[in-house]
Amino acid sequence: MPEFKIIAREKDRTFYDYEISNDDFNAPIVLCGLCPGYTQLKNMLDNEDLNIVEARKSASFKGCTKNIAKMLRKIQLNKKLKINISDDYGFNSSKYFFTTSLVKYPGLRAGKGRSDDFNPLDYEFAKKCIKEIFLKEIIKGKSGVIIIFGKKAQKAV
């Protein structure tokens, strides 16, 4: 069973030393959410044989895959890439997509775990992650298109 080291506590959040990111940063499209963690950590806690890489790939944008696929088809990204983006497309294992988050470390809300009301601008640790990790990755310029989900995430960038 993995141990999750706490690296920051701020207000109602605990951030864990478990960087979550996809493997292929050379993908042409970045799909970026706000903050990872709850589902990935829960998957590891529920299945002690699941390693970090498998847990990471098991959850990114879980529950949103169908909506993301529809959105990408609507803007005809599937035609541009010449691929079939089905409703159950495997974004986490695709060479075309890099799935990531603005804040690379899980920030779980006390007593609740996952929370839809997370605003990274409310937490100094989250702002530091965005500046020191996310923006440096993006500045590397290895990806062509960055799709950032959510108004809070867009505002933070």
Image (spheres, rainbow, N blue to C red):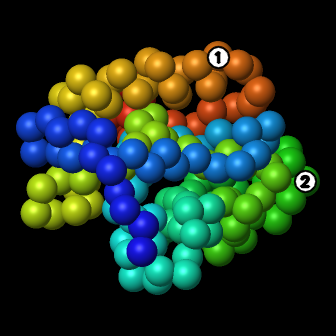
**Side of 116 relative to 94 (left or right):** left
Q: Few, some or many C-alpha atoms within 10 Å of disc 1 (few <14, some 14-19, many ≥20)? A: few
Q: Residue 52 sits in which quadrant?
A: bottom right
* Residue 27 vs residue 19, the one in the foreground: 19
Residue 48 seen in this snapshot: yes
Percent position (x, y) of residue 53? 62, 62
Label 1: which residue? Answer: 139
The relative height of residue 43 versus residue 154 in the rendered view (above or below) is below
Kind of residue sitting beneath label 2: Lys
Label 2: which residue? Answer: 82
The relative height of residue 118 versus residue 1 in the rendered view (above or below) is above
In space, the residues marked 1 and 2 are separated at their CA atoms by 27 Å
Kind of residue sitting beneath label 1: Ile
**Side of 18 relative to 28 (left or right):** left
The relative height of residue 107 versus residue 136 in the rendered view (above or below) is below
Q: Few, some or many C-alpha atoms within 10 Å of disc 2 (few <14, some 14-19, many ≥20)? A: few
Q: Secondary structure at mark 1?
A: helix
Q: Nearer the viewer, mark 1 or mark 2?
A: 1
Percent position (x, y) of residue 79? 84, 51
Percent position (x, y) of residue 109? 17, 53
The relative height of residue 89 versus residue 153 in the rendered view (above or below) is below
**Side of 34 relative to 79 (left or right):** left
Percent position (x, y) of residue 118? 24, 44
Can you say which quadrant of the picture contains the N terminus? bottom left
How many marks on residues?
2
Question: What residue lies at 36% left-to-right and 21% top-to-bottom?
Answer: 128
Q: Which mark is residue 123?
A: none
* Residue 28 vs residue 41, the one in the foreground: 41
CB under 8 Å between discs 1 and 2? no
Question: What residue lies at 51% left-to-right and 26% top-to-bottom?
Answer: 133
Can you say which quadrant of the picture contains the C terminus? top left
